[in-house]
Image: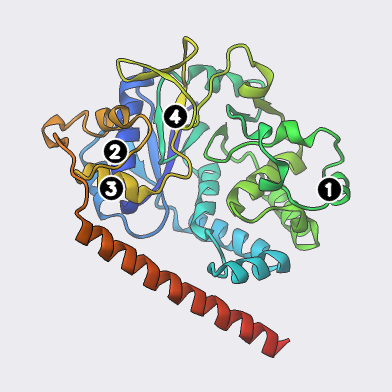
Amino acid sequence: MIDGIYILANDVVYDQLIALLNSIEANAGRKIPICILPYNDRLDKVRAEIASRENIILFEDSDAIAYWDNFAIEIWKNYPRAQKTWREWGFPELYELPMHRKFCAIDGPFDRFIYFDADTLLMGSVDYVFEKLDTCDWVVNDFQYKSELKFIFDGSPEQIQQVFNTDNIQSKIFCAGWFATKKNIFSPAIRAELLDKLKSGEADVMAFLAPDQSLFNYMVLRSGIPYYNFACYDCEQATGNHWSSQFDVVDNILYDQGRRLTYLHYMSISSSAFVKLCGGEDVKIPYRDVFLHYRYLKSPEKRPQSFTRPNQLTLLQKSTSSFIQQRINNFKLNYRNLKDRITK
């Protein structure tokens, strides 16, 4: 049985990817094979990095990538409420479609695996997570269940109850940025059944600000596979993982009230902030020194020794560019709205 780690990445998140890879090597406690799932074709730096390391491969099963791309397209194109909202927001017709490539891990080479978003850092061993997969098919360790349900499912209470037939769905939702499961956990028959249910109207319970996350939650809960959340069911031992929490730092490891974190998640912090930081710009990122430690663990001589703030002219240029782009986005949105009214 092969255990492994998957990461969704491309060159845009290169700095974060390097930090994550180094943190896995430093803190996992053993060598774990890693497979990079391609967010898109911008992979020149990623490919070069893979070539320079052992135990890392790029997922290149074009049939699996096409399958899951089409799977997501079929769902969201047949969900009118999502399409309408994305148009109103000025988003692409298929918002965040590449994020669904996380599903490719199910068809990948590892028998049991943990998926990491690129904006995470591993802080400790994940052996306990793999061990839990002996008794459960889907394992997470996050506090998404304490947030509002509408970020995962925003259908009416009646719809949600009808689809999932449970009164305790709040305790079962999870963040799709970090999870563990098994190869082929959704068989072709289960996939086809769920796809039919979604296209027949059940998609209407899903939220669409993070579409892949809503879909993962739907598929896990609707299929009824055994599920476990350490942060919900083992509260005495669970730690936080979100960057907004207050953690202690000891030798570049984070602790929550004396308990070592499993991972730190920089969710919602733009990748451009990390690019600027690594370029020597004075960007305020939580646990900045910890991130920089892992980013330059193998190349300390390249780590920025000082940080500068952009001068006023640069800030003005950025502000002007942002203003112009906002006006362009507003124009596109107004045009789309007008077009919709004309064609109705």
- CA gap, disc 3 and disc 4: 18 Å
- Dot 2 surroundings within 10 Å: few (below 14), some, or many (20 or more)? many
Find out whether the residues at labels 1 and 3 contact each other: C-beta distance under 8 Å.
no
State the CA–CA distance, disc 3 to disc 2: 12 Å
Amino acid type, label 3: Val
User: Would you identify the image quadrant in which residue 202 lies?
Assistant: bottom right
Q: Secondary structure at mark 2?
A: helix
Earlier in the chain: of badge 3 and badge 4, it is 4
At horizontal 30% and vertical 54% (from top left) the residue drawn is: 43
Q: Earlier in the sequence, mark 2 or mark 4?
A: 2
Disc 2 from disc 1: Cα separation: 41 Å
Which comes before the other along the chain, label 2 or label 1? Answer: 2
Residue 55 visible at all: no
Name which residue lies at 62% across and 21% down. 134
- From what the image shows, is residue 80 above or below residue 221? below
Query: What is the x, y in percent for residue 56?
Result: 32, 37
> What residue does disc 1 label?
163
Give x and y (percent) for residue 189.
72, 49
Q: In x, y percent, where is residue 274?
A: 31, 44
The disc at residue 275 is 3
Circle 4 sits on which residue?
264
Distance in Å between CA atoms under marks 2 and 4: 15 Å
Nearer to us of marks 3 and 2 is 3
Residue corresponding to mark 2: 18
Q: What type is the residue that disc 4 sits on?
A: Leu
Of mark 1 and mark 4, the one earlier in the sequence is: 1
Amino acid at dot 1: Val
> Around disc 4, counting alpha carbons within 10 Å, would you say few (fewer than 14), some (14 to 19), or many (20 or more)?
many
- Name the kind of residue labelled 2 in the image: Ile
